[in-house]
Amino acid sequence: MTVPISFLSDFGLDDEFVGVVHGVIAKIAPDVKVIDVGHRFGRGNVRAAALALVRAIQYLPEGVALAVVDPGVGTERRALAARTPWGFFVGPDNGLLAPAVAMVGGADLMVSIEDPRFRIPTGGATFAGRDVFAPAAAVLAAGEADIGDLGPAVDPATVVPLMVPLAEPDGRGGILGEVLWVDAFGNAQTNVSPEDLAALGLGPGDEVEIEIGGTSHAVRWVGAYGEVPPGEGLVHVDSAGQMAIAVNGGRADERFPVAERVAVTFRRPRIRRIDLSPAAPGEAAGGSAASTA
C-alpha cells in the first residue's frame, strides 16, 4: 500500500526544480500521490519553512513529509529520515524537520540517508532534493524500503534543533513577542497566543495596544476582518491559533512596520482614540486618530 508525499521546498516555481523532484518520485513510485504544500518560502529560510510545516502537518494525510530548504547542501550536514506516529519525515539536518516531528509526537527512529541504492548518482552535490531526498521519500511512500534500509541510525541528541522564540512579559505590563511570518496577504502572525493576552485581561472585542519599533498603535481584537471598517488595523486569532496583525482590505506589512523577526509588544491600551467624525455644531472636531493617553 502506498501513502502520499507532502512536499515543501524553497525552490520556487520559476525553474524546473519542483517538476524534477515530482518526476523522480513518479519514476520510482508512479502510484504515489504528491501534495505540494508550498515552494515559495524565502530561499534558505529554514525557520519560515519549518513553521509552515508545523502549521500544515495536522491537516496533511499521514504518509511522508518531504521538506527541502537546504542552504547547507553539499556540506557535511546530514540527510535525515525520521519515523514518527504520523509517518515519515525526510529532509536536511538543519532544524527544518524538528518542530513538526515534535508536534506529531517525536521520532522513535532517525537515520542518515547514506545507502547508495537509494541515491541518484550525479557529478554534482547541490541538488540533494532530486538526488537524495526524493528517492528516499519515494521508496518509503511506496513501501519499497524500510527506513532502516536507508542508512545508519543517528542519535536524536545530535540532530540540529530549531529554536522558536517564546513570548514573555516585557516588565511593563505587556507581553513581548515577535513576528514569525508575514503571509502573501500581508498578515503578520506572531508568537503571542490568545492565552497570553487573556493573562493581561484582554479578550475579543477589546482594544489592544501594539508597540512596534517604538511606536504604539491602537487596534481592536476582532474575530473577522469585516468587524472593523475598511483600511483599519486589527488583531485576531489566525488559522494557526496565534495572534496576528492585519488590516481589513489592506496589508499589515504596509500599514505597520512588521516583518519576520520584528519585535511586537501587546498590552492593555495606554493610547486613546480620537473621533475623526465631523463635529456637530458647537463641538470641536477631533485631531489625530490616536494619541498617547
Image (spheres, helix red, strand yellow):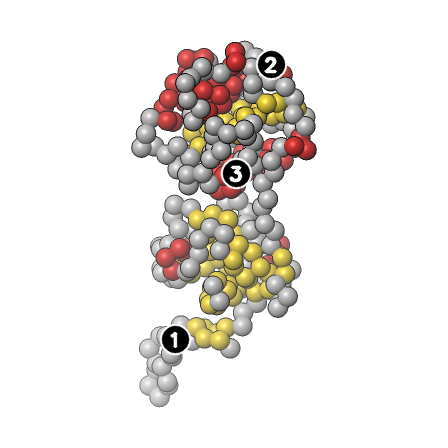
Q: Residue at x 42, y 35 (%)?
A: 10
**Circle 2 sits on which residue?**
149
Dot 2 amino acid type: Asp
**Circle 1 sits on which residue?**
288
Q: Where's residue 264, x and y in %? A: 52, 59
State the SS at label 1. Answer: loop
- The numbered mark at residue 52 is none
Q: Where's residue 118, x and y in %? A: 51, 14
Q: Earlier in the sequence, mark 3 or mark 1?
A: 3
State the SS at label 3. Answer: helix
Give the left or right position of residue 156, taking residue 24 as reference: right
Q: Which mark lies nearer to you, 2 or 3?
A: 2
**Circle 3 sits on which residue?**
50
| Circle 3 Cα neighbour tier, 10 Å, few/some/many (<14 / 14–19 / ≥20) | many
| Circle 2 Cα neighbour tier, 10 Å, few/some/many (<14 / 14–19 / ≥20) | some
**Residue 289 lies in quadrant:** bottom left
| Circle 1 Cα neighbour tier, 10 Å, few/some/many (<14 / 14–19 / ≥20) | few
